[in-house]
Amino acid sequence: MVVPDPDEEQRLRSIVVMRRVRDRIDREFARPLDVEALARGVHMSGGHLSREFRRVYGESPYSYLMTRRVERAMTLLRRGDLSVTDTCFAVGFSSLGTFSTRFTELVGVPPSVYRRDHASAAAGIPACLARQVTRPVRNREARSTRAR
């Protein structure tokens, strides 16, 4: 008879809980969300949630949320029917300055430039492929478009 390893069971339970948190972020990215609210939803402290989420996914829940919001903003900006300000609020940011800063960090260009230059970038490409090709780089890894 194989005796289950309690550490392995705990690790697997933690992964299941972190998937629920990630799924909630994916579903509710446009709503006001913070680490404390996410933590309450899975009955843990904000600090513990942040540590576990980072261990499982390699980034903080806040960073993951910002990336989801920017990905959605990229889609809306490519459509071209919303202004940058309308897009900012549609994806859950409450400040245009924060939106522009975070968007630029992840994508490498400001949202207004992205909207202007990428309005037809995904035309004719299936949505599932367009998302993959146009996904922003996380954690400030976008290359600067300025000459060095």
Image (tube, rainbow, N blue to C red):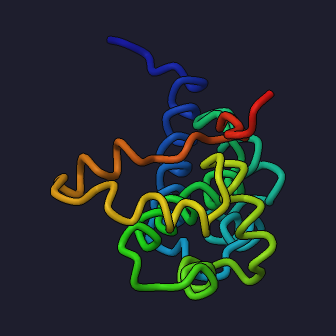
Q: How far from the left and from the top, in percent, is residue 145?
A: 67, 40
Q: Is residue 114 above or below residue 1?
A: below
Q: How many marks?
A: 0
Q: How far from the left and from the top, in percent, is residue 131?
A: 34, 52
Which image quadrant is residue 102 in? bottom right
Residue ID at (65%, 60%) = 66
Q: How far from the left and from the top, in percent, is residue 32?
A: 67, 81
140 or 28: which is nearer to us?
140
Q: Is residue 105 left or right of residue 148?
A: left
* Residue that extends furthest to the top in the rendered view of this protein: 1
Which image quadrant is residue 39 in? bottom right
55 or 84: which is nearer to us?
84
Q: Is residue 87 left or right of residue 81?
A: right
Q: Is residue 7 above or below residue 61?
A: above
Residue ID at (46%, 71%) = 77
Residue ID at (77%, 61%) = 101
Q: Is residue 19 above or below residue 27?
A: above
Q: How far from the left and from the top, in percent, is residue 73?
A: 51, 68
**Quadrant in which the N terminus is drawn:** top left
63 or 5: which is nearer to us?
63
46 or 4: which is nearer to us?
46
